[in-house]
Amino acid sequence: MFAPLFAALTVAAILGSGLMAGLFFAFSTAVMAALARLPEGQGAAAMNAVNIVILNPVFLAVFMGTALVSLALGARAVLGWSQPGSAWLLAGSLFYLVGIFGVTAVFNVPLNDALAAAPGDAQAWSRYLAEWVPWNNVRTLAGLAALACFAMVRQ
């Protein structure tokens, strides 16, 4: 009875993890490098604008929805530990919840807030680039790892 539901949730987790990993990959490999090349102040202003615009219903549905799906799949994994694929479900859930959701909340969002609070501060922008991009790389790798783990689940 629940097998089709968990199969659908697993597909949703694969898609959500992949979308988030792709978004973070694009930022790490292109967007941030382009913003870093802009004249002083313009890169930070553009990033502040991105940080406002990205908080839209589509992004939030994927970001938060995948977190909720990961919580559900992680609970299923723990409660049904003897079932095939439980270890993959738990690993994928932890990669998403810790490596994407947690890193975003603990590192990237506070860095975004600090940048917004220091408009025109060249040192703040340099510090932001030096700290934000490595944490974004962690999110990229965590998204890929979550996707791979969820894809390993056999329904």
Image (tube, rainbow, N blue to C red):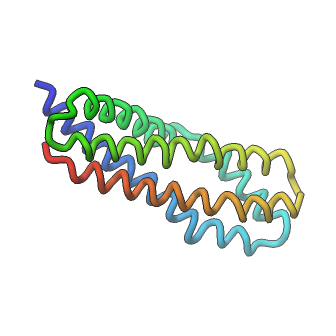
User: Which image quarter: residue 120?
Assistant: bottom right
Question: Residue at image x 66%, y 44%?
Answer: 109
Between 59 and 79, which is closer to the camera in this rendering?
79
Q: Say which of 34 and 130 sits in front.
A: 130
Does residue 25 sit above or below 33 in this rendering? Answer: above
Q: Which residue is at the far left?
A: 1
Q: Residue at x 72, y 49 (%)?
A: 111
Position of the C terminus, as image quadrant, is: top left
Q: Give the percent coordinates (x, y) of residue 71.
A: 38, 32
Q: Is residue 73 left or right of residue 67?
A: left
Residue at the spot 51% in from the left edge and 54% down from the top edge: 139
Identify the residue at horizontal 79%, vertical 47% (top origin): 114
Q: How many marks?
A: 0
Tell me the quadrant of the picture where the N terminus can be found. Answer: top left
Residue 24: percent from left, percent from top: 52, 58
Q: Is residue 3 left or right of residue 63?
A: left
* Rendering coords of residue 72 (x, y %): 33, 30
128 is higher (above) or lower (below) than 112: below
The answer to which image quadrant residue 13 occupies is top left
Q: Nearer the viewer, residue 4 or 34?
A: 4
Residue 87 in the image, given as x and y percentages of width and height:
26, 43
20, above or below 13, in the image:
below
| Residue 126 falls left or right of residue 136 | right
Look at the picture and state if 73 lies above or below 154: above
Residue ranking furthest to the front:
82
Q: Is residue 120 left or right of residue 71?
A: right
Q: Nearer the viewer, residue 53 or 80?
A: 80
